[in-house]
Amino acid sequence: MASESSVCPRKALRGSPEERFAKSYEIADTGCWHWIGSLKDSGYGCLNVGGRTEYAHRFAWMHLRGPIPKGLTIDHLCRVRKCVNPDHLEVVTQKVNTLRGDGPSAKQARQIECIHGHSLVGDNLYIVPSTGKRQCRICRRESNRRCQTIYRAVKRAARLTAKLKGKSLESKGGI
Ligand SMILES: [Zn+2]
Ligand SMILES: [Zn+2]
């Protein structure tokens, strides 16, 4: 069962969804069509369509643009959740939408500098094939070099230990 807050008020049921849609937004200076009908807790506008609660921006797209292909979602280019202007909307895959949002993967995807201030563009940008994570090549090289230095030091120590052991065996044998 949907919670009460997610259901649009009954008074909004008067008229066809298209008519109610047309009366339920205000055009802002930014060009956004601010939804003045019911809003979901998430901040997205909603509209009752044939007894079902539909997102207002999805309805805007379907009503003014056309069907939303299966598996695709509507993204707000203006990032205003209650905006229903189809010019501010775009049909994208769920992955693109997540990347454009404000989650950690989105922030990472938009990062233009590494933590050391090297710019994450062009040749310096390395995408880890298995995870899609963006990395700085300068820092990668630096950390590889550090790893190798440690590796070489460990090897040297091991060789030295082996040599010393060998010597002690020799000296034992010599007695
Ligand atoms: Zn907008
Ligand atoms: Zn870096």
Image: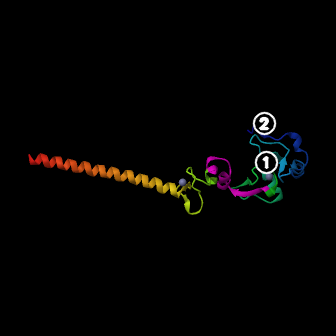
Which residue lies most toward the top here?
4
Identity of the residue drawn at 74% across and 42% down: 42
Q: Position of residue 35 (x, y in %)?
A: 84, 47
In the foreground, 59 or 169: 169
x 78%, y 37%: residue: 5
> Farthest residue in the front direction?
117
Q: In the image, what residue occupies the spot 67% across and 47% down?
A: 102
Q: Is residue 130 magenta?
A: no
Amino acid type, residue under disc 2 in the picture: Glu
Q: Secondary structure at mark 2?
A: helix
| Image: magenta residue range | 88-107
Q: Which residue is mark 1?
A: 54
Say which label, 2 or 1, has the lower sequence index.
2
Give the x, y percent position of residue 38: 83, 42
Tell me the SS state at disc 1: strand
Q: Main secondary structure of the magenta part?
A: helix
Q: Residue furthest bottom?
A: 123
Q: Is 102 inside the magenta-drawn segment?
A: yes
Ligand 2 resides in the quarter of the picture at: bottom right
Distance from disc 2 to disc 1, alpha carbons, whole Å, reads 15 Å
Please tell me how many numbered marks the rendered image carries.
Answer: 2
The residue wearing badge 2 is 4
